Amino acid sequence: SKSCYVKKCFLWSREVKLSGFANGIEYVFGIIGYPVIELSMALQMADIHYIGMRNEQAACYAAQAIGYLTGTPGVVLVVSGPGLLHTFGGLANAQINCWPVLVIGGSAPQDHEGIGGFQECNQVDLARPYCKYSARPASISLIPMHVEKAIRVTKTGRPGAAYLDFPANILAGRVPIDTIPDQYGPTPVPVIYPNPAAIQEAVKVLLKAKRPLVIVGKGAAYAKAEKEVRELIDTTNLPFLATPMGKGVVPDTSPKCIAPARSLALQQADVILLLGARLNWILHFGRHPRFSPDIKVIQIDVCAEELHNSVKSEVAIQSDIKPAVAQILEGLKSNSFAMVADVSTPLNYYTVFHNLYESLPQNCIIVSEGANTMDIGRSMLFNDLPRHRLDAGTFGTMGVGPGFAIAAALYCRHYHPNKRVICVEGDSAFGFSGMEVETMVRYKLPITIVVVNNSGIYTGMEPEVYKEIQESGEVTKVTPPACLTYATRYENMMSLFGRVGYFVKTIPELKKVVQEALQVNDGPTVINVIINPTADRKPQTFRWLTESKL
Ligand code: ADP
Ligand code: MG
């Protein structure tokens, strides 16, 4: 009778709680019938939502979607034989998607096995190919252990499916409550942390990358790694693509999302940071011609067996996305900071630009020309306002700087009297029109000229040449075409006008003289910053990083 049912189910609900369903399970989807009717009611009484569906396959799809969305599996409750068989499409889908789901099937009473019991079939074996764990508790008091294990298995490592088989005799059986062990409480999913050496390796590969690309998969979505991945993209400016269900981990509307150029991006990337996505058909197996034939993959996956699949990864890291991405970002940051923080003399480009930028008024107009000076400067001297940068332009013309600066200063005098003009020149570029300093003096134009002086064109000097100059003071062999006179004192041009310029070799000097120069209102100043002639453009190879906010 109904009241008898309810009483029985009430008692069972205590056991359901004991049985490990307290492990965070919130939803059960199913179609009930013999022998799982009482169990469905007991689940409800244990405050688990029971949703009656119309086909077991749909129930299984629903339960795995709950698993994906919440990280805790939904449960599917079905009857024996065909009821269970109908879940297999769903089970396979969950398993392939790496989504947690737990199917519970009633089955024929054990004493009817082998003699044609009602809906009898070998359910544990049939479910096994689609599951990480498929088992039948051997006794009632072993139920909690299996439930806890099944739920744990769906969530840990690579998420997936589990099946538990409950024969009718076990469902209908009774045991004294004190024989049920109660140590099977909630089990937190352990976080897999990456090997620090592998993270360092990944950072190294990324720093050397010319056209790096981040691919965000549904593993990153499942891992709830949005904070870390967004921070990585926002801070480093790395371009990214999302797989269909990786969409939204970083907003599709992010300027760094290069979905519109997906094919091109995949083809041209030289390094791929793969976050929770498999190089399967969705990603064209990571292979040529959709990817570059010598693509380097930095692969992060919680599943060790997935590493190196289809394409051998340059760096393969078994880890949860969250800690791995956070640590890669830390690594990238400390590298870039190391460059900017390197104030040893002779100075490098990055330190000079970083500190120059910090010393400049935010609204100034920046005129710039040179090779390295202009290229690196573009990435490190930020502009907040439109039409506030004038440089060698479409035609790549050297010698435009002083003329542009004069025009900008006249414009400011007329329209923005408080705005400053800063003219950042490579030493070679400055040579083209440097004499216009006289014009600036004549018209009392307060232009701050900064010559970033590496004693040559492009990378000023080969290390051997520089070494010779340091040792003997001159170049004895044929002068290389890229060399200019070592450490020319361009600031002395100011003495032509009875004024003084600034000679700078260190960062404290740079900061001090920029402040002084910005006070000069009745004419130009020249700040001659000596940098290492061999300061190379290696950092240029990861412009994606130096253009970032690191
Ligand atoms: P997509 O369809 O977006 O390409 P896939 O399903 O192919 O994504 O790949 C998802 C990958 O994410 C799987 O290899 C899985 O092992 C992995 N994964 C799942 N959860 C995590 C996690 N927390 N941390 C890292 N990797 C995870
Ligand atoms: Mg130069």
Image: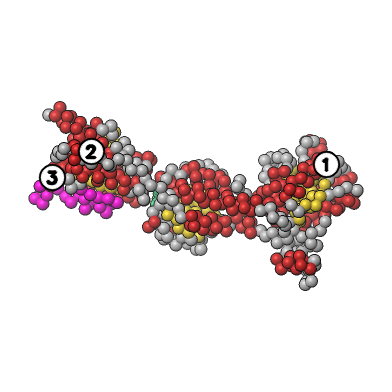
Q: Position of residue 548 (x, y in %)?
A: 60, 48
In the visual, does 271 lie left or right of 167? right
- Determine the secondary structure under disc 2: loop
Residue tagged 3: 109
Amino acid on which the number 2 mark rests in the picture = Ile
Q: In the image, is residue 3 above or below residue 68?
A: above
- Determine the secondary structure under disc 3: loop
Residue tagged 1: 520
In the visual, does 306 lie left or right of 330? left
Residue tagged 2: 31
First in sequence, mark 2 or 1: give its number: 2
Amino acid on which the number 1 mark rests in the picture = Val
One can see residue 284 in this view: no
Tell which of 526 and 121 is nearer to you: 526
Q: Residue at x 85, y 43 (%)?
A: 523
C-alpha distance separating marks 1 and 3: 96 Å
Bin the neighbour count of mark 1 within 10 Å (Cα to Cα): few under 14, some 14-19, many 20 and up. some
Location of residue 542 (image quadrant)? bottom right
Instruction: Point out the residue furthest to the bottom here.
Output: 477
User: For residue 128: magenta?
Assistant: yes
Bin the neighbour count of mark 3 within 10 Å (Cα to Cα): few under 14, some 14-19, many 20 and up. some
Q: Position of residue 253 (x, y in %)?
A: 53, 42
Q: Residue at x 30, y 40 (%)?
A: 185
- The residue stretch that appears in magenta: 111-136
